Image (cartoon, grey):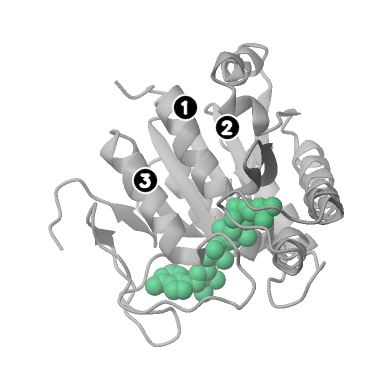
Amino acid sequence: MASEELTLVKIGGSVITDKGKPLSFRYENLNNLSLALARYRGKMVIVHGGGSYAHPIAKKYGLKPEPVKVEPKGVTLTRLGVFTLHNEVVLSLLKAGIPVYSIQPLLILRKDCVDAFNEALSCNLTPITYGDVIPSREGCHIISGDVLMRLLAEHLKPKRAVFIIDVDGLYDTNPKSGRLLKEVSLTWLPKQSENNGFDVTGGIVGKVREAQKIASMGSDVYFVNGLYPERVLKVLCGEETISTTISRRVES
Ligand code: ATP
Ligand code: IP8
């Protein structure tokens, strides 16, 4: 059964960085979004993506969502990018009034450690985690923030899962020429989707697939534009706004 209070929020790298330009923050977007999240009174767990601080470096060193043998230095450098972005996100959220508690994604994969999220929540902290690189016997692999959202949803059974991206929601084809959809089904996928060239975790299609799995577990799932923080706050509060939801009823 879904937890009445808890909301999972994924802050997309497309909102807080410029994915067209390696290592570039979008501070104003980040700070405005932090202020909107701080106005939400319910319990939250936050995940953020890697944006231009992770994907270009991961791509350069051949890292993928599947385990691969890569030059170890590439793992360290990718994570350095992730941590640089993470620090800025933590500072911005803290300045806005959200006392976050950083949790390494590795703990989510170690089933006996995943309760750290509930424990942080019970101390009135807001747990935050991020897309990362994970070592395994078969090689290192990327775990995207979208996959972490799904793993956390399995464990925490949130009422709501909100994917914050830099466009108004999901479009039938693509945001430039397509039509914005208010609802999509559990099996819908965009007809044609563009990737910005260096996204190593599947871009919008990978995100939609994970979001559909979360919706099928019973959470309400939304895609909303983080460039309009007031819309994000409305989605968190369960109010009507421009967004896309994944419906368990709609066929398509
Ligand atoms: P990150 O993975 O770095 O955290 P993110 O979560 O913000 O990034 P992306 O993987 O960059 O998300 O996906 C969002 C991007 O997908 C948007 O910038 C948008 O232009 C693009 N996109 C492509 N096709 C579609 C579509 N059909 N509907 C919505 N967005 C789409
Ligand atoms: O941006 C990717 O996470 P995402 C993290 O949520 C890395 O897809 C290390 C590329």
Residue position marked by numbered label 2 in the rendering? 45
Residue at left offset 38%, top offset 41%: 238
Residue at left offset 42%, top offset 76%: 193
- Which residue is nearer to you in this view: 236 or 244? 244
Q: Secondary structure at mark 2?
A: strand
Residue at left offset 32%, top offset 49%: 212
Other residues around mark 2 within 10 Å, as few (<14) / some (14–19) / many (≥20): many
Residue position marked by numbered label 1 in the rendering? 6
Other residues around mark 3 within 10 Å, as few (<14) / some (14–19) / many (≥20): many
Residue at left offset 60%, top offset 21%: 117
Residue position marked by numbered label 3 in the rendering? 221
**Badges 1 and 2: C-beta atoms under 8 Å apart?**
yes
Quadrant in which residue 96 is drawn: top right
Q: Is residue 73 left or right of residue 44?
A: right
Nearer-N-terminus badge (1/3): 1
Determine the CA span between mark 2 and mark 3.
14 Å
Q: Secondary structure at mark 3?
A: strand
Question: Which residue type does callout 3 highlight?
Answer: Val
